[in-house]
Image (spheres, coloured by chain):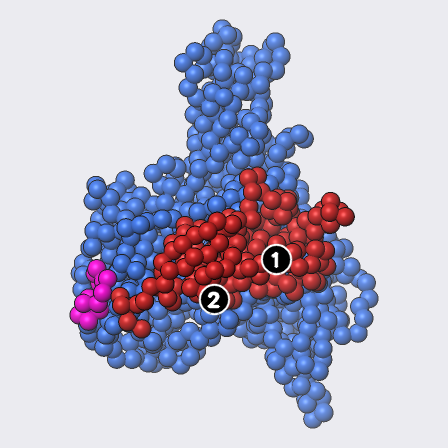
Chain colours: A red, B blue
């Protein structure tokens, strides 16, 4: 790959509900584009090889590791990041994370929030085992795992009861 | 416990206060919404991106470094090699100033920087780094303890180099430091023993694996100094070391330490910051190094160890003697590892009443990446052996291993290390064992193929320390606390906010906590050894009380009262006319010009000369862990069905943070017991740096049932009787899990991690032995 003569791609995508256009080298990952081109640093970079889940975002409603997606691939698609799911004062899920002590160093947490929201969008009332299975791609070295599971369970219960 | 800590008023919990409640994490919402700025999130539009040049072996003489091709590549602004640095090569370290800013003619470990390239983009820097040609001759490096201790071993640190280890009697060996702790007469006790257990154990090298990788930004200032942004646990140590290396004053080196995304000990001591400082000064440009997780794994690790132990028991289960020989594999440079060895081995006899004990420990240099502090320091390595010995003794004597521990555990105030530098229990440690047994259902019968194991762990906390804090009570009743502790996930900021809220009567939401900036925040020695609650907590408490004292005096002067007639309590002044809230009293005292009340607090604990730890421990962390497994005998695979961790915390200042730390430590301990290890090849190359190959616990590895508990006797030296608690649950996890596996499988495994393969092999060997 010859650096400098690298072909640039212009990408137009819906990012957190807003149309955005940016130009990046063809090999730039979605993760790097979000963080450096769009200033959306809530999505974290850690392993950069699809193993830790810190970079989880939603692409057309599916949770993906943004370090494994090329920015060019999201042209014409919809991307939702942690900034896009957050509201002032925190969502019910984010507040549940705090109530249950799930946020320790916090570095993995944006990715955990995205994976949990994705899970709840597919399975509104997941069991403990289902949460563990669905979120097993999100590492937390502070090992807040049980705290997060409690937070997701509580959120699911509350959401189901308000909807039902 | 040091007098400085003992003498102070620690205060009692307010029934209606914040301390002691599940106050939500300070900065938690920012973390959950992505707004929190970690080091890599800071924006430096003008910064050059840096790539480090290394060679693919662990030990080699560097014959030449050719940067010409790299320098001509697009976007490259500059390259730093050893030739750009002062001669002799500047070196840094804590106890030993042995680590060069970059490889000094010889690479001593895999990953040691040979050059650094700065370019406009990361892609350009990476490409140019690959274009740097390093001519080297591989040397017969020592990558294992056995190789390093062999009679004709290659010496990791050149004994002829006058800058290193001058006057050190061990300089012709790879042993950088050694320590023996001994009391009683081993031979005499052995003569009385009904059983002697003897075995060898190994504890692999592991890595801290913070999800936030290392990141450094160095920015030259107009005044000829530097601002260094780095997510470190010890910003003031970083400032001192960088200033010393580049020959500047402390005022010229400004360290900004964004809250680390996990540290676990791995972010204490400088790694790439000195190199980045020289690079920034050479180019007079802001330079930025952002590693990924695998590169971070290569840069920081915990010392592995090999242990040989002999332990004698009476028929009733009294431990009569314990003799341990332990070698810690510390890597190419000292970092803090000699201290990992001394502190770990000091408690190597365990928290027991031992008539005779001898712990011989060595810190051994090898051509492996530099080991540093990690949660538990040097205690988990030695406890793996000591506690496995106790379990084995109990098993062979047909005694209950929990009750053997209760029988031998020291009582509060009793010595578990004897001699001039004795160590004494500072808590009701048996209560933790009893509580863990209750939580685990210790005496309940188990179905077949299940096994339960118990272990206890102990660790000495800081033996000296200095923390300074400022608290500003503002005119509108809000407050700002300055505390130099790094909040890396343990929740320090929350504790300071809770403390200030209670002591000054300010709503917790109106307390702001400022940390991580050496220009703004007063000195704090370090964030390590679970010290912060005790040391910085005391400094914050004292700063609050200084505010109260001043408010009392100002108020008395304004209203014309005798200050002696006014008392203060958390949040209020008590006047002869009744109670006045502190913020109201402050407003009256401050008067028309307004302003604020500025309090300061210091907590200082001096060390003790000659003490093997440099001083008496300010407190001990004590933990009891019980693990229960279900084993598949056919494959050696097992599931952790229940895991119980109980620590003596003194007082829970924030119960939800205590649970999070206790669970987090337990799970990290289990990872280290059942899956984690760094693997090097015969050239000293790390083979499993990536997150794919170095496994850490995921959601699926959490025990089916994870139960935690605390012993609270309000007997710690910290505020409200607290003790530090973040390391307890990792101290003896390996031995508890090992004991559970032994109980289920009927065989003993002496090497960590406890993989299915090891258990299967041990089971097979035992079966074959039985047949033969
Ligand atoms: S950074 Fe994408 S999965 Fe780890
Ligand atoms: S909270 Fe620290 S890694 Fe998850």
Q: Is residue B457 visible?
A: no
Q: CA distance from mark 1 to mark 2?
A: 18 Å
The stretch drawn in magenta includes residue B44: no
Residue ID for mark 1: A118
Q: Which mark is residue A40?
A: none
- Would you say B231 lies left or right of A134 here? left
Judge: label 2 CB < 8 Å from ligand 1. yes
Q: Is mark 1 within 8 Å of ligand 1?
A: no
B752 or B667: nearer the eye? B667
Residue at image location 23% in from the left, 74% down from the top: B133
Q: Is residue B69 magenta?
A: yes
Residue B232 vertical position relative to residue A7 in the rendered view, above or below? above
Q: Is residue B245 left or right of residue B390?
A: left
User: What is the total number of numbered labels drawn onto the structure image?
Assistant: 2
Residue B114: x %, y % from top left: 27, 68
Residue at 65% over, 56% down: A121
What secondary structure is found at the residue carrying circle 1?
helix
Measured as percent of width and height from the top left, residue B405 is found at 69, 60
Q: Quadrant of residue B159?
A: bottom left
Question: What chain letter is assigned to the residue under label 1?
Answer: A
Residue that appears at 48% across and 34% down? B512
Q: Which mark is residue A68?
A: 2
Q: Which residues are magenta?
A: B68-79
In the image, residue A153 lies at what x, y percent? 70, 53
Seen in the picture, residue B104 relative to B135 is either above or below; the reply is above
**Is B323 displayed left or right of B554 in the figure?**
right
The residue at 57%/35% (across/down) is B498
**In the image, residue A85 above or below residue B131:** above
The crowd level at tag 2 (other Cα within 10 Å; few <14, some 14-19, many 20+) is some
Q: Position of residue B532 (x, y in %)?
A: 50, 44
């Amino acid at each position: 790959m010859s650096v400098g003569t690298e072909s640039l791609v212009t990408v137009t995508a819906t990012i957190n509900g807003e149309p955005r256009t940016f130009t990046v080298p063809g090999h730039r990952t979605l993760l790097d584009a979000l963080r450096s081109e769009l200033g959306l640093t809530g999505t974290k970079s850690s392993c950069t090889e699809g193993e830790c889940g810190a970079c989880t975002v939603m692409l057309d409603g599916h949770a993906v590791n943004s370090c494994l997606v090329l920015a060019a691939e999201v042209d014409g698609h919809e991307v939702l990041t942690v900034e896009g799911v957050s509201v002032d004062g925190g969502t019910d899920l984010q507040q549940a994370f705090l109530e249950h002590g799930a946020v320790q160093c916090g570095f993995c947490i944006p990715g955990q929030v995205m994976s949990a929201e994705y899970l709840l969008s597919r399975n509104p009332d997941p069991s403990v085992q289902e949460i563990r299975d669905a979120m097993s791609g999100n590492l937390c070295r502070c090992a807040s795992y049980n705290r997060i599971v409690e937070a997701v369970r509580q959120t699911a219960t509350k959401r189901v009861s308000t909807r039902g | 416990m040091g007098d400085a800590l003992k003498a102070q008023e620690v205060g009692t919990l307010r029934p209606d206060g914040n301390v002691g409640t599940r106050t939500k994490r300070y900065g938690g919402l920012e973390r959950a919404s992505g707004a929190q700025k970690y080091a890599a999130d800071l924006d430096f539009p003008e910064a050059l991106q840096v790539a480090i040049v290394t060679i693919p072996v662990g030990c080699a003489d560097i014959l030449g470094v050719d940067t010409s091709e790299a320098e001509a590549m697009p976007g490259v602004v500059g390259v730093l090699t050893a030739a750009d640095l002062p001669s002799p090569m500047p070196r840094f370290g804590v106890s030993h100033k042995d680590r060069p800013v970059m490889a000094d003619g010889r690479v001593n470990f895999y990953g040691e920087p040979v050059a650094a390239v700065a370019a406009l983009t990361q892609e350009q820097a990476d490409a140019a780094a690959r274009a740097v040609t390093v001519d080297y001759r591989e040397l017969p490096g020592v990558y294992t303890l056995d190789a390093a201790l062999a009679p004709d071993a290659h010496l990791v640190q050149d004994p002829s180099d006058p800058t290193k280890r001058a006057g050190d009697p061990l300089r012709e060996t790879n042993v950088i430091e050694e320590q023996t702790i001994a009391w009683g007469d081993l031979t005499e006790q052995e003569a009385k023993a009904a059983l002697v257990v003897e075995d060898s154990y190994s504890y692999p090298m592991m890595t801290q694996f913070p999800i936030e990788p290392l990141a450094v930004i160095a920015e030259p200032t107009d005044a000829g100094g530097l601002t260094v942004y780095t997510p470190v646990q010890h910003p003031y140590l970083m400032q001192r070391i960088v200033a010393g290396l580049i020959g500047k004053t402390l005022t010229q080196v400004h360290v900004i330490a964004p809250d680390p995304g996990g540290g676990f000990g791995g972010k204490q001591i400088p790694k790439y910051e000195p190199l980045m400082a020289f690079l920034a000064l050479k180019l007079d440009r802001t330079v930025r190094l952002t590693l990924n997780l695998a590169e971070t794994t290569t840069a920081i690790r915990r010392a592995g160890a090999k242990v040989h132990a002999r332990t004698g028991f009476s028929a009733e289960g009294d431990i009569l003697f314990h003799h341990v020989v332990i070698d810690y594999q510390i890597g190419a440079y000292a970092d803090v590892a000699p201290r990992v060895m001394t502190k770990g081995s000091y408690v190597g006899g365990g928290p027991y009443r031992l008539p005779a004990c001898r712990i011989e420990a060595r810190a051994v240099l090898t051509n492996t990446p530099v080991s540093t502090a990690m949660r538990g320091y040097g205690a988990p390595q030695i406890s793996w052996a000591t506690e496995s010995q106790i379990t084995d003794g109990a098993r062979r004597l047909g005694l209950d291993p929990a009750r053997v521990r209760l029988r031998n555990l020291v009582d509060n105030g009793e010595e578990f290390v004897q001699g001039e530098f004795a160590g004494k229990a500072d808590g009701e440690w048996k209560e933790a064992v009893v509580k863990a047994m209750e939580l685990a259902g210790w005496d309940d019968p188990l179905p077949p193929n299940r096994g339960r194991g118990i272990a206890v762990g102990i660790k000495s906390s800081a033996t000296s320390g200095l923390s300074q804090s400022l608290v500003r009570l503002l005119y509108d009743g809000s407050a700002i606390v300055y505390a130099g502790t790094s909040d890396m996930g343990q929740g320090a900021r929350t504790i300071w906010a809770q403390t200030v809220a209670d002591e000054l009567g300010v709503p917790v939401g109106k307390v702001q906590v400022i940390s991580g900036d050496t220009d703004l925040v007063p000195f704090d020695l370090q964030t390590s050894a679970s010290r912060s609650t005790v040391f910085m907590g005391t400094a914050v408490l004292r700063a609050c009380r200084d505010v109260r004292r001043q408010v009392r005096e100002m108020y008395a002067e304004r209203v014309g009262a005798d200050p002696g007639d006014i008392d203060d309590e958390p949040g209020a002044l008590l006047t002869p006319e009744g109670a006045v809230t502190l913020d109201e009293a402050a407003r009256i005292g401050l008067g028309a010009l307004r302003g604020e009340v500025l309090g300061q607090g210091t907590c200082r604990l001096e060390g003790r000369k000659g003490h093997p730890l440099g001083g008496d421990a300010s407190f001990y962390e004590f933990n009891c862990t019980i693990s229960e497994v279900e084993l598949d005998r056919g494959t050696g695979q097992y599931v952790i069905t229940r895991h119980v961790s109980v620590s003596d915390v003194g007082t829970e200042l924030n119960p939800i943070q205590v649970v999070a730390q206790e669970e987090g430590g337990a799970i990290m301990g289990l990872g280290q017991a059942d899956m984690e290890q760094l693997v090097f090849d015969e050239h000293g190359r790390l083979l499993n740096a990536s997150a794919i190959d170095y496994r850490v616990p995921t959601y699926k590895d959490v025990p089916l049932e994870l139960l935690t508990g605390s012993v609270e006797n309000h007997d710690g030296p910290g505020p409200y009787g607290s003790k530090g608690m973040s390391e307890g649950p990792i101290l003896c996890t390996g031995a508890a899990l090992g004991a559970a596996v032994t109980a289920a499988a009927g065989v003993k495994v002496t090497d960590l991690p406890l993989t299915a393969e090891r258990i299967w092999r041990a089971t097979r060997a035992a079966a074959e032995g039985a047949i033969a």
